[in-house]
Structures are given as structure tokens and as C-alpha cells.
Image (spheres, rainbow, N blue to C red):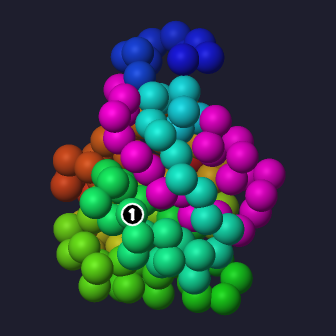
Amino acid sequence: MRGNPGLAAEPFGGTTVLLVDDEARLRDIVEMMLEDLGASVVVAGDGASALEIFRHRAGEVGAVMLDLRLRGLDGLGVLARLREIVPDVPVLITSGAVPDEEILAGIVSRGCSFIEKPFDVAGLGAALQAAIDGRPVVLRTS
């Protein structure tokens, strides 16, 4: 761990997270944060790549972290297709803009958690754990 006081040492050790974000700089930062939490990370820069990776590695992936506003196939479209492959895969959805209440309710009703960008490692860890535990949360930073 790179040093985040107050966090349990590598709470996601042994968990593989598929990280899907089309902004390379943000994806790199979040990848480092997930690694700080002990996760192994597989990255995809768009929805189509994420689905291809997931089809081949679904048995390894313990959770998916998915940007809501992807170019091309958006996050909700990717979510629907992921759930066709593995219906109960834990998903944490993220976005820089908080979606309206109807979209948030839809995210939660699908058993997913949501976290607003920007977030810190502690917030990411809490939201990811909630998604994995099947107790969806909505974490806003603004």
C-alpha cells in the first residue's frame, strides 16, 4: 500500500476489479487507488473492450467499476450486457456529474453502488465494499 492512514491494509487483496473509463488520465489514477486498496486491476477504455474482457475473464473478475458516461456504449448499456453474462456481478458506477434522481434510483435498484468523481481512496473503498456486499450506496462529493 502506498500509504493511506486509516485504511485497513489492502482490504481488497485477492479481488480483481475491471475498471472501465474512457479518460486515460483518470483511469490511471483510479487504477493506482484500487491497487492501494490491494485489488488487482484490469482496465478497459470503452464499453466494447470491457465486454470483451469480461466475456473472457468473468470467472476472475470480483467487481466492475464503470464510468456512467462512456463514449459509444454508455455505462448503463455496458451494465445491462455485463449482467447478461454474470447476473450478480458487483458493480460500482461512477461519474463526474451526479445523474438525476431517476437514474440514481435505477442504478440502486439494479444492486449497484454509485460514487461521484472526484473521490478519495477511503470513499472508493467504502463504495466498492458496499457494491461487493450487495448493499448499494450513493456517495456524493458535492
Which of the pair 75/84 is nearer the observer? 84
Residue 97 falls left or right of residue 75: right
Give the residue at mark 1.
57
Res 33 quadrant in image: top right
Can you see residue 5?
yes
The number of callouts visible is: 1
Residue 127 magenta: no
Q: Position of residue 128 (x, y in %)?
A: 38, 46
Asked if residue 33 is positioned above or below residue 56 in the image, the reply reads: above
In percent of the image, x 38 and y 85: which residue is there?
A: 81
In percent of the image, x 76 and y 63: which residue is there?
A: 23
Can you see residue 137?
no
Asked if residue 56 is positioned above or below residue 6 in the image, the reply reads: below
Q: Residues within 10 Å of mark 1 (few under 14, many from 20)?
A: few
Which of the pair 138/25 is nearer the observer? 25
Q: Position of residue 83 (x, y in %)?
A: 29, 78
Which of the pair 127/71 is nearer the observer? 71
Asked if residue 1 is positioned above or below residue 111 in the image, the reply reads: above
Extreme residue toward the front, this view: 56
Res 59 quadrant in image: bottom left
Residue 59 falls left or right of residue 7: left
Q: Position of residue 29 (x, y in %)?
A: 70, 42
Residue 20 magenta: yes
In percent of the image, x 54 and y 17: which residue is there?
A: 1
Magenta span covers which residues? 11-32
